[in-house]
Amino acid sequence: MAITIKSQREIELMTRAGEVLAIVHEELGKFIRPGLSTLDIDKKGEEIIRSFDGCTPSFLNYNGYPASICVSVNEAVVHGIPRDYYYIKEGDIVSLDAGVCYKGYHSDAARTWPVGEVSDEAKRLMKVTEECFFEGIRYAEAGRHLNEISKAIEAKAVENGFSIIRDYIGHGIGSTVHEAPEIPNFARIARGPRLTPGMTLAIEPMLSAGDYRVARLADNWTAVTVDGSLTSHYENTILITEGKPVILSLKS
Ligand code: MF3
Ligand code: CO
């Protein structure tokens, strides 16, 4: 599939979807605490999303995904299915990945939150993951090529001694959650497509403090590092413009 260029109207809808998602993450960040089940977090997230007129959770039933929020704890990288029997505790780092659909258009963003006091390594991993995103989008400019974003993300992670998850990647986004292009968080040989104003992309570095290899749990969704190492995830939906990219899922 070709990469879609959004019209002004589509950009407006995605801007709203992103704005709501920024609030969802902000609220969930305040809500999260030891003793909650991952399903409690999902329910709260779904409630916040639906409290906004015309907004629904993008992930619910997407490819059969059974919840509104992906809740991935510690060695779980992405797509953690919320469970009423899985309780978060002090010292955990919890990645929350969510999407909002507004009038047929989606936003997609992830944050990783510390639960109470966490290890220095966990803090550094979360910080560097976020830095990888911001390093990547320095190259998210019209006229550059996609591989420049990927390369910058990888370099930042590696120079900090972390590894990049390779089995899950960023993507274009619009009237479906996943569109072309694929956006790996590591450099490839090909320079990739040329960035053009009106492209909307979900850039989502996922880092491991140990080995990057992952496996899926028996639930067929939850991806965990094979060596059990800690992971972090940070994602935003961005818009390519004539100038600097606009981060749609972050409050300005
Ligand atoms: N942000 C997630 C991703 O890009 C979206 C997952 S949707 C789900 O993979 F339904 F698969 F959870
Ligand atoms: Co995504």
Image (cartoon, grey):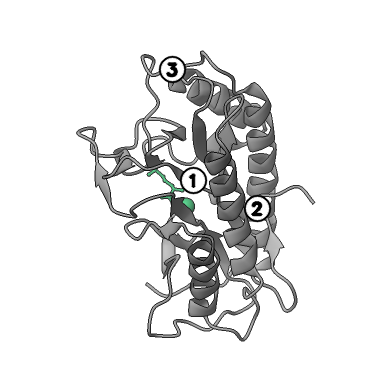
- The answer to whether residue 99 is visible is no
Q: Is mark 1 within 8 Å of ligand 1?
A: no
On screen, residue 122 above or below 193: above
Find residue 87 and name its label: 3
- How many other residues sit within 10 Å of disc 1, few (<14), some (14-19) or many (≥20)? many
Where residue 172 appears, as percent x and y from the top left, is 48, 64
Where residue 141 appears, as percent x and y from the top left, is 65, 78
Dot 1 falls on a residue whose secondary structure is strand
Dot 3 falls on a residue whose secondary structure is loop
Residue at image position (24%, 36%) is: 217
Residue kind at label 3, given as amino acid type: Tyr
- The answer to whether residue 48 is visible is yes
Q: Say whether marks 2 and 1 touch (CB < 8 Å).
A: no
Q: Nearer the viewer, mark 2 or mark 1?
A: 1
Find residue 232 and name its label: 1
In this picture, residue 169 sits left or right of residue 247: left
Q: Earlier in the sequence, mark 3 or mark 2?
A: 2
Residue at image position (47%, 82%) is: 193
Q: Outermost residue toward the right?
A: 252
Residue at image position (36%, 14%) is: 85
CA distance for labels 2 and 1: 29 Å
State the quadrant of the N terminus: bottom left
Q: Nearer the viewer, mark 3 or mark 2?
A: 3
CA distance for labels 3 and 2: 36 Å
Per the image, the residue denoted by label 2 is 13
